[in-house]
Amino acid sequence: MIDAPDHTTEKRGDRSALAWLLAALLGIALSAAAGMTSYGYTTAQAEQRFSDVVDYVATQSLSYDAFNSAYATKNLIRVMEIAGEAARDMERDGSADNATLEQYADQFNVTALIVTDASGNLVSESSTDNVSYESLAANLKEAPVLEVAAHPLKSYTARITLADDSVADIGCVARPDGEGIVVAVRHQSAKAVASNTLKLQSLLDGYETIDSGNIVIENDGKVVATNAVEPAVSGVFDLPATDAIVVNGIKERCLAGKVRLVNDSGEWYLGTFGKARDFYVYTYAPAQRYFEVVAAAVASVLALYGGVIATVVLVRRRAESQRFADLLLQERDYGDKLAKAAREASSANSAKTEFLRRMSHDLRTPINGIRGMVEVGNANADDLQKQTECRSKIWTASGLLLDLANEALDMSRLESGQVDLNLVPTDMVALNREVCDILERQAEERLVTIICDQRTLDHPYARVSVTHLKRLLLNIAGNAVKYNRQGGYVRLTCREVEPVDGVPVYEYTIADNGIGMSEEFQQHLYEPFSREEQQVEGASSGTGLGASIAKQLVELMGGTMSFTSALGQGTTFTICLPFEKCKSSEIPQAVRVDAGDSDVLQGLRVLLVEDNDLNAEIAQFTLDRAGAVVTHVKDGESAVETFAASALHEYDVVLMDIMMPGIDGLEATRQIRALDREDAATTSIIAVSANAFADDRRLSREAGMNAHLSKPVSSQDLVEALAHIAADAS
């Protein structure tokens, strides 16, 4: 018997082949759809990413330009003021020779003072630092400068870039005592200019090419910053040929903000550009990295499809079915992680965006104030009092700008690990007193009381990074002042607690009764860019970096920081810092002066200038007890007359009050320094005044004073200030 052929297996094989063919065709269709979808999505993402980079760099370049312009303007205004002051002094003294100019140059801390005739020819000069009339002659004979001589009410100022890339800021005014021009020059080396200038290149340091692509900033067709290549020399970039071709391709093919494909010798790039004033910003990246995403998407679809096919084939096998279920669970978990990461990235981006928005506002506010005060000053050129008020307000506004820049730089240095602690022997009590003095001056404007509770320290001398400790304390305590109510208080307490491994631990407690913090904000206090929404009237908002910087400084110093706060009731910060104690040989000898010693100032001859009888009596008592010989006069005019009538070197030091009737202490100092006698320039003159602000100290120095003591002055501080003078005189 011959069995008939069995066609069942053959038919089953045909059906299986057809099924696999259909499955393959379906897989190809799904892969094509996934590729097209992924390509569209990837291109849109690239366009958004590039647009964000271009917009940020363009916006920040404008901010950097504004900052640099403001810094240069400040220097030019000051050098023009110095030229005016020098011209007035020349008229008063009736002299403009080289020796007089040298004295003025040293007094005003300028590089050079130059006097020319109405044609710009040299009359006399005092110059240093290789900047002289010869190097500036061509500039000083230009028409805008010569117009100053022809029109005495005019002035001229300019920044001149020299051959070595250093700059000379010049201010020119007409001579009030005759025809000619007085020129004040302040020179800055190329390195100094660079250190005080925000560089566009720094904008790009945080952009890695692998993440953000290559970024190129051009100005007048010249590359001024890029992350694509290191500069050949400082500030000079030579793009590789490929990059130059790609940039030129973007210029030819792209619309602003629109991503296009650019080809270079068969290699494709995605790129776009944007414009900010004089700057063009180009960004691009190899298209391959984006096409790889498309390939990965297709591969993922194919893999998923293959998994589905395998699951269908092996559906009857429990183990495989379970494995498939586990795979789905893993994918779900991965999706959750991706979603979480996306939310965190979105939150971080929102925080940075809010920081930039607030920083833009905070920068514009003082800049607007500075520009406004310049306009007010120009409109009141002959009103000295109004000019002084304008300069004071400009100083305050520029201080706010500096604070904002410092906080941003501090954060950058801390995050990059570039902060080094310089530990030096330090008088902890004196440091704390200095911090309290600064806080008291800040608190005066807000009518806030500073309470300094200095406990007895077992180790009053320690090895400390003074700059960073002051920064930390002023950061926390300064915020306590800023966000307090009028009539509130801030208490700063310093005490020693239990040492750790033999190292003294200093506990600082900063407590206030201000507005406090909400529970929600407390959760984010140490996060960068975070700020409480509630504000105090009259308090300027900060960057949201202060608490984060303080936290990192504490950790850098090996300490701990904690806080408690209640909304509407106040906040208390507790900071514990371990500092190594000083050896006895490291303790400065100057701090061992005792105001009660009868011979610490023995023989020191003091001219005391004080119009207040009570203050004079107290000072004379303190000085007499320390062994000094005191002569007391009540006003500035008497001080000048007494000094002029005295024998040569009769007085070792002059204690000069500032606010006095008639001639004040500043003018009296200027007149004493101007006397034609040997000791007029060498005798120490110390200001003793209730004027304790930074401007007051600056005015004292500019008048010719050697130091500035702020009232109330303790007996200890007064004697310590004079102790080294007594030592030199003996």
Image (tube, rainbow, N blue to C red):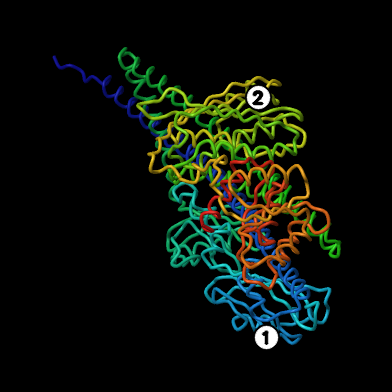
Q: Are marks 2 and 1 in contact (CB under 8 Å)?
A: no
Cα–Cα span, label 2 and label 1: 65 Å
Q: Amino acid at mark 1?
A: Leu
Could you tell me which residue is drawn at 77 percent across and 34 percent down? 537
Q: Is residue 615 left or right of residue 530?
A: right
The answer to whether 689 is drawn above or below residue 29 in the figure is below
Q: Amino acid at mark 2?
A: Met
Q: Is residue 340 visible?
A: no
Could you tell me which residue is drawn at 60 percent across and 28 percent down? 453
Residue nearest the observer in this picture, 49 or 259: 49
Q: Is residue 100 left or right of residue 232?
A: right
Say which mark, if any, is on residue 517: 2
Q: Which residue is mark 1?
A: 122
Give the total of numbered labels: 2
Residue nearest the observer in this picture, 303 or 190: 190
> Which comes sooner in the sequence, label 2 or label 1?
1
Q: Is residue 439 visible?
A: yes
Q: Secondary structure at mark 1?
A: strand
The answer to whether 652 is drawn above or below residue 171 in the figure is above
Residue nearest the observer in this picture, 54 or 577: 577
Q: Position of residue 716 (x, y in %)?
A: 59, 41
* Residue depth check, mark 2 versus mark 1: number of the one nearer the observer: 1
Residue 199 picture quarter = bottom right
Could you tell me which residue is drawn at 83 percent across and 77 percent down? 152
For mark 1, does the 10 Å Cα neighbourhood hold few (<14), some (14 to 19), or many (20 or more) residues? some
Residue nearest the observer in this picture, 594 or 323: 594
Q: Position of residue 626 (x, y in %)?
A: 58, 45
Q: Position of residue 71 (x, y in %)?
A: 65, 59
